[in-house]
Image: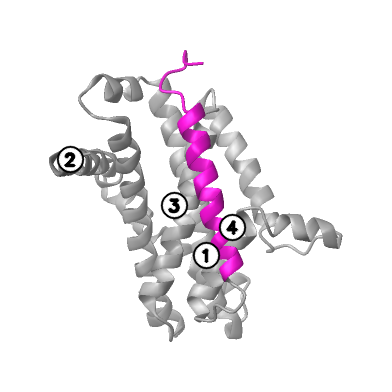
Amino acid sequence: MSRTSLRTEIKNAWGVARLEMTTYTRSIGGLLFALFMPTGLFLLATWLWYPEPAWGLAVPHITTIVVLSSGLFSIGVAVTQQRLDGTLRTYLSSPLSRKAYFLGQVIDRITVTIVGIIILIVCARLFRGVFFDGNILIFLGCVLIALINMILFGFLLASRYTSVEVAGGSSSLLFIAIFMLSGYVSLPIPDWGREVISYLPFEPVVKLLEAGWSGNFEGSWQNLGVCLAWSAIFLLLTIRFFKWSRNDR
């Protein structure tokens, strides 16, 4: 690809991202919800569930929930809706390339999620006295890796959903299952089962974010490798199975 073509692709992708962001900016309520939802979840969790000594641990845990939601709901449901209402076919019939569309969707979700998490970190310090002693860029880098992983997972799910109702219901069930498989809930699982779970993409995402927050990466390289490997798998499967209209096979 020439340098001019690359600039065009990036410009088109940013155009898609800006168009998608109008979903949040059409109303002040929608924008505030998108940006402050992580902070609201954090304040609620530290009020109801987390004891004060564990308030710092709540930040990476809430970040994990937001990252999972970005893939399962923000991408999975939204892209399914765009397929059903013909938006994807409109994109496809324009000069916009498929790569630019996917990249634009990724830019949109990453931008909104990262800004929301930065607000969360600031508010955690202001309202709960949670100080972040690590490297903020390393933590946000871990968030970026985990977020790309779940966004690609969301694209793969969206390629198979046949309706918004199916997308919403399936995403909710998957969210509960993933929440349990991520280590948040103590389950009576045999050792071999825990070994299998450690190679699924969900528990490594949690551990990677916890390591990024604490700055302690001892034993975390496997989690990073698992996340990157699953990202590549999700990408290849999405390229193979993604449907641009309900009639695609």
Q: Which is more toward the observer, 16 or 74? A: 16
Residue 92 higher or lower than 78, as above or below: above
Q: CA distance from mark 4 to mark 1?
A: 21 Å
Residue drawn at point x = 41 percent, y = 73 percent: 138
Circle nearer the viewer, 3 or 4: 4
Residue 96 higher or lower than 184, as above or below: above
Circle nearer the viewer, 2 or 1: 2
Is residue 213 visible in the rendered structure shown here?
yes
Q: Does 64 lie within the magenta span?
A: no
Mark 2 burial class by Cα count in 10 Å: few <14, some 14-19, many 20+:
few
Q: Which residues are magenta?
A: 221-249
Residue drawn at point x = 17 percent, y = 42 percent: 11
Q: How many marks?
A: 4
Q: Does 230 lie within the magenta span?
A: yes
Work out whether mark 2 precedes mark 4 in sequence or the reverse, and give the earlier one: 2
Mark 1 lies on residue: 62
Mark 3 lies on residue: 148
Badge 4 marks a residue whose secondary structure is helix
Does the CB distance between marks 2 and 1 fall below 8 Å?
Answer: no
Q: Which is more toward the observer, 210 or 184? A: 210
Mark 4 lies on residue: 226
Instruction: In the rendered structure, find residue 2 and report the number of the disc placed on it.
Output: 2
